[in-house]
Amino acid sequence: MAKRLLRSLTPDDLRGRRVLVRADLNVPLDGSSVTDDTRIRASVPTLDFLTGAGARVILMSHLGRPKGSPDPAFSLAPVATRLAELVAAPVRFVGDTVGQEARDASEALQDGEILLLENTRFLSGETTDDPDLAGALAGLGSLYVNDAFGTAHRAHASTAGVAQAVRAAGGMAVAGFLLEKELTFLGEALADPERPFVAILGGAKISGKIDVVEALLPRVDRLLVGGAMANTFFLALGLDVGKSLVEEDRVEMARELMDRAGDRLLLPVDCRVSDRIAPDARVRTVARDGVTGDDLIGDIGPETEGIYREVIRGARTVLWNGPMGVFEMEPFAHGTLSLARAVAEATDDGAVSVLGGGDSAAAAEAAEVAERLSHVSTGGGASLEFLAGAELPGVAALSDLEAE
Ligand code: ADP
Ligand code: MG
């Protein structure tokens, strides 16, 4: 069901209103400095829109995995400092989430100001979607904006419970700009892709992605498989994979998938192997039936790169999840970087490209093509669950377009 969008609200709806925003500000920290502010920057359009309209923004997020109680190492204070440099509005921070201090600070907010609350995971009710906590959060605002795609697949008090509580109190719960963009790109890629529709799947394991494969299989024109995931398919073909990473218990599943997919599923024809996976490994290229003994497959080979690149260049829609090799190490990065460039080139030629997965996003950054892709999802697990067809609790809890 389509959801209400922040985009559809007018300045008159927002001026002077206390708006509770759930963003995904879960950024890496080194002590008290933010080492990668991508997620903070991704939240800016929603915050600028709200403060520009004169709303009083009460902002919340989780950070890291504190154990349901305050832990200074996971304070959002450094995030407030960085956020203040990125938005025009004044940013205040309070070291409390739903207590008296937080309520007082939210009461003191002026039009066009932002108050960042302390880490929602300092509270034990967050991850259990405790109704009391959700109600206390809902008490801070009369409009709820969810912009945290990265946690939308979790039913937490600050994602699902609060949306229900705000609506129960007569308010509205809407999707912010980032959440809207994620749902649009990921949703359209699945629902109505322009063809040829090519999916690239890689990464370490099939097991974590089987639902994605199942959801994509009936829709794609080509499914390009790489990464360690391909090794399990090699076993299903009766090939020797040496000492490579495999999932023995998924061989039967791989065989069954190959049967169903027929010639739409492509596997690597050659591989880059070594006797160890290390930054200074010495790499050989072998045909896929030439892997033996102590070989470890660390990347797809050059011939595979050529075949895959050509398929990608002919696509009108490309969906990519999972690197083709151990791209974190230079000797095994070639396949992933080469395909990343092919996806960017296809996008330059007018294809729609959507990339999901945390490591895949890092690979696109490493290949310096992230900006050229149509959409790089900010949610790792959430994008996978969405692509697999699951309903995300943080989205399901928002107001329906028709109803309100
Ligand atoms: P994403 O985060 O994009 O969903 P995954 O987490 O599924 O991707 O997989 C990424 C990981 O898979 C990377 O750490 C990479 O090193 C690993 N990987 C890819 N190919 C291989 C391989 N052939 N052998 C071992 N690990 C691999
Ligand atoms: Mg990953």
Image (cartoon, grey):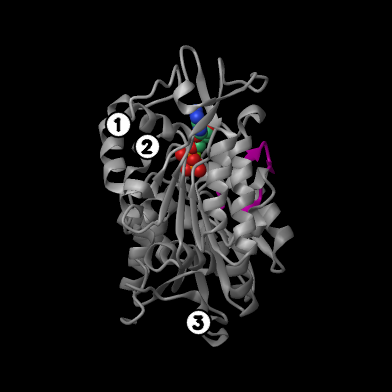
- Callout 1 amino acid: Arg
- Callout 2 amino acid: Ile
Q: Earlier in the sequence, mark 3 or mark 2?
A: 3
x and y percent of residue 383 in the render?
Answer: 44, 53
Magenta highlight on residue 162: no
Q: Residue at x 47, y 20 (%)?
A: 291
Q: Nearer the viewer, mark 1 or mark 3?
A: 1
Secondary element at tag 1 = helix
Magenta highlight on residue 25: yes
Instruction: Looking at this view, name the residue that lies furthest to the bottom.
Output: 12
Where residue 389 sits, quadrant-wise, is bottom left
Residue at the disc numbered 1: 250
Secondary element at tag 3 = loop
Picture disc at residue 206:
2
Dot 2: few (<14), some (14–19), or many (≥20) neighbours within 10 Å?
Answer: many
Q: Residue at x 40, y 58 (%)?
A: 159
Q: In this picture, which residue range is highlighted in magenta? A: 24-38
- Callout 3 amino acid: Leu
Where 10 sits versus 56, above or below?
below
Q: CA distance from mark 1 to mark 3?
A: 48 Å
Which quadrant: the N terminus? bottom left
Where 63 sits versus 196, above or below?
above
Q: Earlier in the sequence, mark 1 or mark 3?
A: 3
Where 372 sits versus 281, above or below?
below
Residue at the disc numbered 3: 9
Where residue 206 sits, quadrant-wise, is top left
Which quadrant: the C terminus? bottom left
Instruction: Looking at this view, name the residue that lies furthest to the top.
Output: 293
Determine the main secondary structure of the stretch shown in magenta. loop
Q: Earlier in the sequence, mark 2 or mark 1?
A: 2
Tags 2 and 1 in contact by the CB under 8 Å rule? yes
